[in-house]
Image (spheres, rainbow, N blue to C red):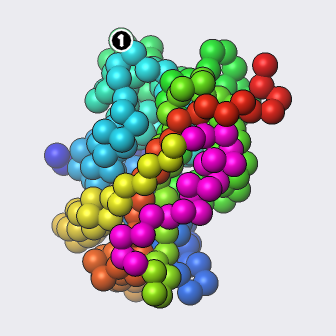
Amino acid sequence: MTGTPDPAAPATATPAACAPAWPGDWATDGLWRLIWFGPAHQGWEFGSYAGPALLDRAVEELPLHASDRVLHLGSDGGETSRYLALGAGCAVTAVEPDPVRRGHARRRARALPPDVAARVRIAGSTSEGTSGPPFDRVLVLQPARTGDDLAAVLRQAALAARPGGRILLGELVHHRPGRPRGAAPNGLEVRLRQAGFAGPRSVDITDEAVDALRTAQLTLIRRRHEVLRHLPPAAADQFLALILTAQADLREGRSRFWAVSATRTSPVPGRV
């Protein structure tokens, strides 16, 4: 599908905004922006970049049903909300703390068909977004990319989820030397238990991430002058090179993408 520039997209882009550098490891915010957040803010149309492939897996893992009330913790300009409302038919509340991204998300929601738009709510804070009945499902995708403390995000998720509700945490885990390639990210599972979730189940979704990066690479090459027009040529070259490095690290097992799902069963202090 060919997209058109989104008027709500940022007027400027810098290498730091698109792929921020992290000491000794690309495997954090930069990669996630490449395959998810960056495309959304460059105006690529729904389905033309790789994000939905990862969300498809999330829908399978939770699973999601049309009757579910879903909370999305994370800021992506409304892409996830649009996908869930259109694709899964859920009622979605997204927390978008940044006012620019929140405005972008609300414009995207208003552009949906009226019956779909009625199922989407964009909140400016967690307290605003979690007012009302608890949620059936909570989706937390790469919280590190927003700079949030993971423990705090998971506590918010536990407070928002109903007993028996499900959470899905999507995280990129740097592969440590000597660690078995298929080892589950036990640290993430421990964090979920500490927050009040039980029975965590980890699924390696690295193959989907590799496919996502390949899609991002091909799209950026094909539409370089449109999508990367705000970057100097050298910065655009670095941007594309980062994708190749990320693909190699994922293929060779130096980093892995994991989806960790769990059920909210434990009482949460402070919840009425």
Q: Is residue 235 in view?
A: no
The magenta span reads 180-198
User: What kind of residue is marked 1?
Assistant: Asp
Query: In the rendered view of the protein, which quadrant contains the C terminus?
Result: top right
The stretch drawn in magenta includes residue 174? no
Between 200 and 35, the residue placed more toward the observer is 200
Q: Residue at x 47, y 87 (%)?
A: 177
Q: Residue at x 43, y 20 (%)?
A: 68
Relative side of 164 to 31, left or right: right
Q: Residue at x 63, y 47 (%)?
A: 193
Q: Give percent across and percent down for residue 144.
A: 59, 60
Q: Is residue 121 in view?
A: yes
Q: Give percent across and percent down for residue 140.
A: 53, 45
Relative side of 270 to 268, left or right: right
Q: Give percent across and percent down for residue 142.
A: 52, 55
Looking at the image, residue 196 lies above or below residue 214: above
Q: Give percent across and percent down for residue 88.
A: 32, 27
Quarter occupied by residue 234: bottom left
Looking at the image, residue 238 lies above or below residue 185: below
Between 257 and 130, the residue placed more toward the observer is 257
**Considering the numbered disc 1 on the image, is that residue within a helix, a strand or a loop?**
helix
Looking at the image, residue 179 lies above or below residue 117: below
Quarter occupied by residue 242: bottom left
Looking at the image, residue 140 lies above or below residue 34: above
Q: Write down the residue under mark 1.
A: 115
Q: Residue at x 57, y 41 (%)?
A: 198
The stretch drawn in magenta includes residue 196? yes
Relative side of 102 to 61, left or right: right
